[in-house]
Amino acid sequence: MPFIEWQPTPERNVVVLNETADLYRYFDCTGAAEFLYACVMRTVEHDLPREIEYLRRHDEAIHRIMDAVEMPDRIAGNLVMFIRQNQGTLSKKRRASEYEKLSDDEVTLLEGIVREAFEGFEGG
């Protein structure tokens, strides 16, 4: 505003008296560029390594589950998710519905496999 010369009009509007195109042509996007840089750095240094570690552990759990008990990949993947969501155990509801064919010993074994695979991995 200090660089714009203007005056009010009788219609309660304003009239700009000087050339102002240069004031708008090249805006300062330093803040936006710094924010974008910080986002990219967080993704590269934190999010991607964490995601790779999660996938490595998930694949390890799936392979060990498949070695222990024969089941479709999708069912094994869901099993890992359900056990992780319930802090290392398969819920009674899931046990009674989707995994009713597994014996108690198999469920205990599979819960142990998932807990071992994700031991020390922080958060969701």
Image: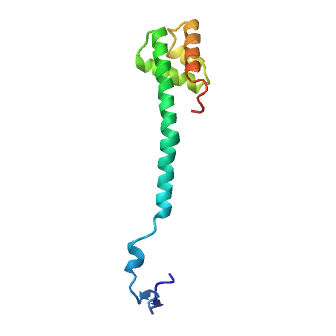
Residue at (44, 90) in percent of width and height: 11
Judged left or right of residue 84, residue 60 is left
Judged left or right of residue 9, residue 90 is right
Residue at (45, 86) in percent of width and height: 13
Considering only vertical position in the picture, is 5 above or below 38? below
Write down the quadrant of residue 107 in the picture.
top right
Considering only vertical position in the picture, is 29 above or below 4? above
Viewer-proximal residue, 56 or 61?
56
x and y, in percent, of residue 6 in the image: 46, 89
Considering only vertical position in the picture, is 85 above or below 7? above
Considering only vertical position in the picture, is 91 above or below 108? below
Judged left or right of residue 88, residue 68 is left
Q: Quadrant of the C terminus?
A: top right
Q: Is residue 64 visible?
A: yes
Q: In this view, which residue lies farthest toward the bottom?
A: 10
Which color mode does the image show?
rainbow
Numbered disc total: 0
Q: Is residue 90 visible?
A: no
x and y, in percent, of residue 51 in the image: 49, 34
Residue at (41, 18) in percent of width and height: 73
x and y, in percent, of residue 50 in the image: 52, 35
Write down the quadrant of residue 105 in the picture.
top right
Residue at (52, 11) in percent of width and height: 100
x and y, in percent, of residue 17 in the image: 41, 90
